[in-house]
Image (tube, rainbow, N blue to C red):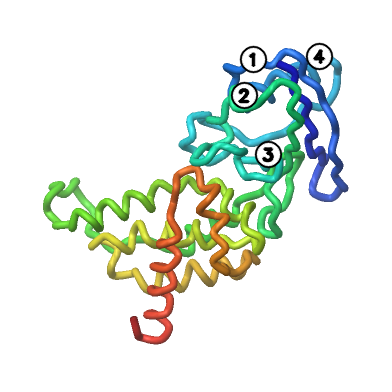
Amino acid sequence: MRIILHIWRQRNAGEKGRMVRYELPNVSEHMSFLEMLDVLNEELTMKGEEPVAFDHDCREGICGMCGAMVNGIAHGPLPGTTLCQLHMRHFKDGDELYLEPWRARAFPVVKDLVVDRSAFDRIIAAGGFISVATGSAPDGNAIPVQKESAENSMDAAACIGCGACVAMCPNASASLFLGAKIAHLGLLPQGQPERESRAVAMVAQANRELFGSCTNIGECEAVCPKDIKLEVIARMNRDFIRAKCGVG
C-alpha cells in the first residue's frame, strides 16, 4: 500500500526543525511501524540523503526506547501498544501520517524523532535504594506479601519509562511515570523504610527537571502502552503528603 509520511526533521538541538514529506509506494501490511521507517531510511541512504533518526532497541515493547507522535497520538492510534508493536495493517492505502518527537521541555530534541530522556534516569537515581540485607538469595516466601499488594506492585512495575505519558499530557507532567516507580516499591514490605523519603526525593527531582504538574486530565493513562492506571498518581500523592505533613 501507499503511505505518505510527514516527518519532523531537525539536524540537532540548536537548529530549527521542519516537516518533510516522503512517500512510500510499496508498504506491506505485515511490516511493523519501525520496519516501515527502516525501508524509508534504506531508500534515503541509497539516494545519499540523511536517514531519519529514531530511537529503538528491543522492538518487542519491553525496553521503552521507541516513541514518537503519530498524527498527534503518542505511539500511534492503537491503545496499549508501543511504536515498535504497531503494525501497518492498522493503516489504509493512501494514509498520510505525521510523525513528531515527544514534545516536552524536559525532553529536548536531539535529532529528528530522538529526544533526550535522561531526566527519567535522574529521577530514578533520586529514589535511592532499598534497605535490605545483601548476601545469598532469600527464600521466596521469607517475607509475606499480600496478593493484592503483589499484583498492584507488578502492575506498576510494568512501566517501561517510554515517556508517552509526558508527551501526551498538556502539562508535560511525568506524574504517571513517577507514580508507577514510587508505587511498585512502596506497595511491598521491602520498600517501606524509604517509602516516604523516596516519594519526596523523586518528586523534587521531577520539579528540578521542569516537568509540569498533574491536573488529572487522564491523557497519560490513555496512551500508556502498559496500561498504567491513574491510581498510582493518587498513591504517590498520599505518600508525599504523609511525608511532608505527617498525615494520611
Instruction: Give the mark nearer the N terminus: 3 vs 4.
Output: 4
174 versus 93 height, above or below = below
Q: Position of residue 173 (x, y in %)?
A: 59, 62
Instruction: Give the mark nearer the N terminus: 2 vs 3.
Output: 3
Instruction: Give the CA distance from mark 2 to mark 3.
Output: 12 Å
Q: Position of residue 18 (x, y in %)?
A: 86, 42
What amino acid type should be assigned to the residue bearing mark 2? Met
What amino acid type should be assigned to the residue bearing mark 3? Val
Classify mark 4: residues with Cα within 10 Å, few (<14), some (14-19) or many (20+): few
Instruction: Give the CA distance from mark 4 to mark 1.
Output: 20 Å
Look at mark 2 in the image and give the residue it sits on: 88
Q: Position of residue 103 (x, y in %)?
A: 70, 52
Classify mark 1: residues with Cα within 10 Å, few (<14), some (14-19) or many (20+): some
Which circle marks residue 28 in the picture? 1
Residue drawn 85% across the image and 44% down it: 17
153 versus 88 height, above or below = below
- Quadrant for the N terminus in the image: top right
Q: Secondary structure at mark 1?
A: loop
Look at mark 3 in the image and give the residue it sits on: 70
Instruction: Give the mark nearer the N terminus: 1 vs 2.
Output: 1
